[in-house]
Image: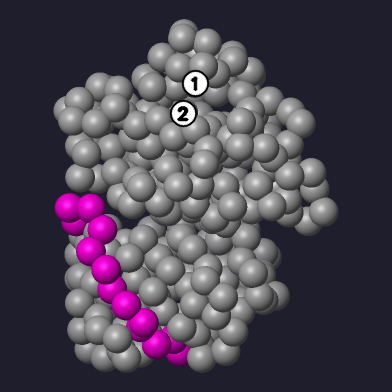
Amino acid sequence: MPAPPPDARSFRSEVVSVTPCGEDGVLLRIRPERPLAPVRASRFFMLRREDALSPSIPRPFSIYRQHGDELEFLIKVMGRGTSALAQSRPGTWLRTIGPLGNGWPALTGGGAPWVMLAGGVGSAPFYMAVEQALAGMDGQRAATRSELHFLFGAARAGMLYDLAAFESLGVAVHTATIDGSHGHKGNVLNLLEELQRKGTLPERVRVLACGPERMLEAVASWCDARGLDCWLSLETLMGCGVGICNACPIPTRPEGPRGAWPNVKCCVEGPVFKTDEIALHALGH
């Protein structure tokens, strides 16, 4: 049975700040009681307040940024768990479990361009992905800014969370909104196709995507039809984050590298999967 990562721990963290972000989000910054080693982009932590305001089951959040001894999370306020975190004040204590899961592959330079597709709060695992690609990870060749393209899609401009921060990274940033209020009018996959039509991006790219499930299904299907390498960071609901509760199964492809078992656990074997490993269309809606 897959086990939690060896560096995962349960510990307390103190809230440093909570800053509004976009029309319905916050940036939550916390200081763990013990410093953590650098965390790979798209790994996640389970968070809850230690008082009665939070539900007893913590919620999973991809790490957004790491500032020395402090961690930052981009949170869309949706229900009781996220509302409790958003209402925290400096000095509030959180129960923190992590770092959990795996992360993006090393985004090495020298191959096809890396195209990052973010849908709304699905932008969270990409800020550090760009930082780590430019710095080089695990001794791999660093990517150049021209090899990285961040495509940010949302329903409307107010959901392009912390857009200026992504633009400050110095890589190509393109936006799409369904209502046309910012950038290309349409979804993020339409935007990718438009950039390819214009010659801004070549036909052969390497794709990373994070966002709503239907978006990820569309991206996976699009990449499969073109024979493109694609990795997805899933936003699946989780109960424990460490592989015990079995609340986050993802169907595998029988012909794929994980096909010996019908499901994988998103929390310990993900949240990042290559599209040839999983069958999102089999989840149902």
Please check the rendered image and state whether residue 233 is part of the magenta-colored stretch, yes or no. no
- Label disc, if present, on residue 219 of the rendered structure: 2
Residue under the image location 48 percent in, 36 percent down:
150
| Residue 234 visible in image | no
State the image coordinates of residue 201 (x, y, percent, origin top left): 55, 18
Circle 1 sits on which residue?
A: 222
Residue under the image location 73 percent in, 44 percent down:
142
Q: Most prominent secondary structure in the magenta stretch?
A: strand
Q: Which secondary structure lies at badge 1? A: helix
State the image coordinates of residue 71 (x, y, percent, origin top left): 48, 73
Q: How many marks?
A: 2
* Image quarter hosting the C terminus: top left
Q: Which secondary structure lies at badge 2? A: helix
Q: Amino acid at mark 1?
A: Trp
Find the magenta span and give its range.
Answer: 12-24
Mark 1–mark 2 CB contact (< 8 Å): yes
